[in-house]
Amino acid sequence: MDYSLEFDAATGCHLFRGELGIYTASSVYAAWMQLLRTDGPHSIDLAGVTEIDTAGLQLILLAKRRAGSSVRFCNASEPVRDAVRLIHLESLLEPSAVASL
């Protein structure tokens, strides 16, 4: 039930690792909203997401709604790609993140 969000200066992305779901939603929401209040654009790398549920998908939707084009989600892990495909919201992710769908 842990996660981390770290900035990678080499790529310019914020690397998310861990669970993106109901048990982490409150703290992930706070971290993402703090990040999105700073000058963008922002890239959040989802390659390290190990689990995602509907709460995690709602967080991605909320971030896109709040930040619009100033936030992008890239390098989606297999669990993220599967969840996004299931609800037909591939447009939430960068094209390269869904290329294998």
Image (tube, rainbow, N blue to C red):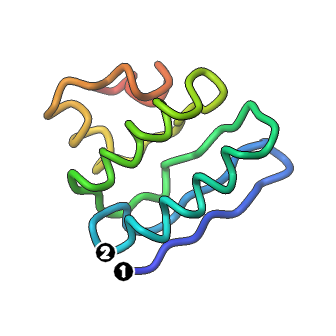
Distance from the alpha carbon under mark 2 to that under mark 1: 6 Å
Looking at the picture, does residue 38 appear above or below residue 18? above
Looking at the picture, does residue 47 appear above or below residue 20? above
Estimate how packed mark 2 is, as few (under 14), some (14 to 19) or many (20 or more) residues with alpha carbons within 10 Å: some
* Amino acid marked by disc 1: Met
> At which x and y percent is residue 51?
30, 62
Q: Nearer the viewer, residue 39 or 44?
A: 39
Q: Any mark on residue 1, and which?
A: 1
> Residue sitting at 31 percent across and 74 percent down?
23
> At which x and y percent is residue 33?
59, 52
Of discs 2 and 1, which sits in the foreground? 2
> Residue sitting at 78 percent across and 42 percent down?
11
* Amino acid marked by disc 2: Tyr
Looking at the picture, does residue 9 appear above or below residue 81? below
Quarter-wise, where is residue 4 in the image? bottom right
SS class of the residue under badge 2?
A: loop
Determine which residue is flagged by label 2. Answer: 23
> At which x and y percent is residue 28?
49, 64
Say whether marks 2 and 1 touch (CB < 8 Å): yes
Q: In the current view of this chain or complex, which residue is farthest to the left? A: 86
Q: Is residue 12 left or right of residue 92?
A: right
Image quarter of the N terminus: bottom left
SS class of the residue under badge 1?
A: loop
Q: Nearer the viewer, residue 17 or 37?
A: 37
